[in-house]
Each structure stands twice: as structure tokens, then as C-alpha cells.
Amino acid sequence: MYFPSRSTPSRDYPRLPWGRQWSIYAASRKNVPKLKKGEDPFSGVIADKKKPSKWVKYWMKEEERLAKAMRHAGICLFEGWDKGVADDRVVKAMLSGCVVAIVPPHTLHGTGE
């Protein structure tokens, strides 16, 4: 399954050698809830209450949906796979049990100096 960024046009999706496309993961098309005055979206607390804001709930649900898609995909492909780009989405896929199709990432190991 291919997991494109929201801003990637469909013409840039990778094609399989025999001309077909990967299955495509589509993020939710719902609008992100607007923040109200007094809401802190990063703490997930509305003013002095101890429950998550709608904004936090929205993103938690999106993350759960993404993780479920990754678990059931079998093989995951992300933008930058051909350049060895290993970002947070690649790590999430690996941790969720998805086999990630990627060129081995380039890493530089320090010499300790």
C-alpha cells in the first residue's frame, strides 16, 4: 500500500513495473476542528478540564486509522523510498508490523570527535 503525503498529486504516485498502481491510502477528508479560545492543542486539555480537545481527538483518531491501515497492508511504500528517506512514517510502519519497501537509508556514523 502506498502512503502519499496529502500534498502529493496522483500523477506522482509510483507505478508498478507492469503498469498498475499500488493500493493508495487516503487520509480522512474531514476538516480539522477549529481551536477555541483557551484551548491548548498540544497538551490536549481544554482550559482547566482534564479531557482532550476535539483537535487532539481528531489527530489521535487519524493516527489510529493510519496504524490500522499499516498493520493490514503487508507492504508499505512511502515517498522518498527510492532515495532511502527514513522518516517518522517509515518508523511507525515498521513498528506497526508492516514490511517497508525502501532503498536502505544512508547513515553517517560519527567518529566521536
Image: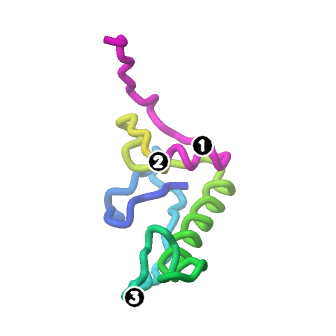
What residue type is disc 2 on? Asp
Instruction: Tell me the tag on residue 36.
Output: 3
Mark 3 vs mark 1, CA separation in Å: 36 Å
**On screen, residue 83 above or below 50:** above
**On screen, residue 70 above or below 99:** below
Q: Give the magenta range.
A: 90-113
State the image coordinates of residue 90 (x, y, percent, origin top left): 50, 45
Instruction: Tell me the tag on residue 88.
Output: 2
State the image coordinates of residue 37 (x, y, percent, origin top left): 37, 88
* Quadrant where the image shows the C terminus: top left
What residue type is disc 1 on? Met
Q: Residues within 10 Å of mark 2 (few under 14, many from 20)?
A: few
* Quadrant where the image shows the N terminus: bottom right
Q: Residues within 10 Å of mark 3 (few under 14, many from 20)?
A: few
What residue type is disc 3 on? Lys
- The residue under label 1 is 94
Q: Tag 1's secondary structure?
A: helix
